[in-house]
Image: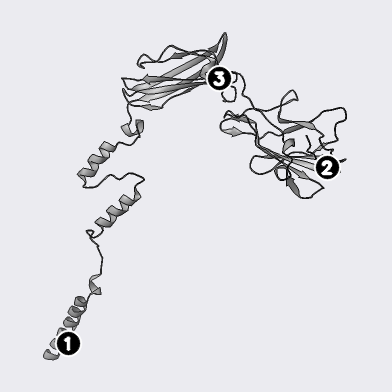
Amino acid sequence: MNGPRALPAGSAHIVHFEPISVADLFHAKPSEAVELVLEGDEPPHVEVEPMKIAGIGYGEVVLRFPAGLEAGAHFALDYGNRQPDGTIAARVAPIHMRGLTFEIFTQLEQDGPRSSWLNTSWLEGLPTVDLVADAPSRVRLFGPTLVGTGAAFRLRLAVTDAYDSRSEPPFAGAIALEAPPGLLGLPGQLERTAGDASVGAIEGLSCPEPGIYRVSVDARQGQTSLGSSLGTMLVGGVDPEMTDPRLNEDTLQRVARASRGAVIPAGDINALLARLDESAPAALLALRKDLWHTGWSFAILAGLLAAEWLTRRRWGLR
């Protein structure tokens, strides 16, 4: 909807859109389809110029009004990706979202300056966008890849839509789990309700024997299967630091005592500087100096030359 100010002939609205089409987490294709939807008995005459890229990943749509635009006149845009049947639909990003970033400018004449709507007090004309995820269609399994023998770990599960966004409506059904006998604490089935927000976690799992363990999950909503997911873990056969990289202060304290050092917290820079200042006088400064760059070397060479000269004079040698 146009604001309370009529626009002259040849003016335009310029809209910058954030892309809302994402095929998966690692591939983003900007939405490129824009189609004008006219409303009312006498809709305004609007020319939609081809979309251009404005900035990083943003599309720019120019809506030109050859005959001007009356105050309060309104129309709509379909924005998204062109589907095989010719319609326009927007895919939902992997991160669940309910808003779309955009900015609107007004140009009162061809090639004239652009004024932001936020600077012209036309806030009542700003459009709204509401993105909602699709129905449950996939199941995802998340777990560690390296596990210590006998160490406790957990698995997390999520039911998403086709684009890895949290499903809407939430998943309600059973998730079947299957793993080798050596994995302890894994239930055969996990029931989820709408109140669980399509996610779940299984705590207190462990594998007392080393080896490669594969866990498979299969989600089913009523009679409809949502597919399966497979996770692989290596138990044992790795350094403890790889399975548990957290700070081990006891070990650091023992190493510091054995080497007559100290453990200083990462954020305590003042303590580190103080210890460096205290140890500076006790440090030995090693300098390398060539032997012939000393006074003693020059004196010895001069003495040898004088002795040779005197010996030659003594014995009449030339």
Q: What residue type is labelled 1?
A: Trp
Q: Name the residue under label 1.
A: 309
The one nearer the camera, 316 or 235, is: 235
Q: Which amino acid does label 2 sit on?
A: Leu
Say which quadrant the N terminus sits in.
Answer: top right
Q: Position of residue 65 (x, y in %)?
A: 84, 40
In the image, what residue type sits under mark 3? Arg
Mark whose residue sits in front, 2 or 3 = 2
Residue denoted by label 3: 138
Q: Where, quadrant-wise, is the C terminus in this rendering?
A: bottom left
* Distance between the alpha carbons at the discs numbered 2 and 1: 110 Å
Q: How far apart are marks 3 and 1 (CA)?
A: 102 Å
Residue 185 vertical position relative to residue 91 in the rendered view, above or below: above
Mark 2 surroundings within 10 Å by alpha-carbon count, few (fewer than 14), some (14 through 19), many (20 or more): many
How many C-alpha atoms fall within 10 Å of the one at disc 1: few (<14), some, or many (≥20)? few
What whole-number distance in Å separates the C-alpha atoms at marks 2 and 3? 49 Å
Residue 239 found in image quarter: top left
Q: Is residue 208 left or right of residue 161?
A: left
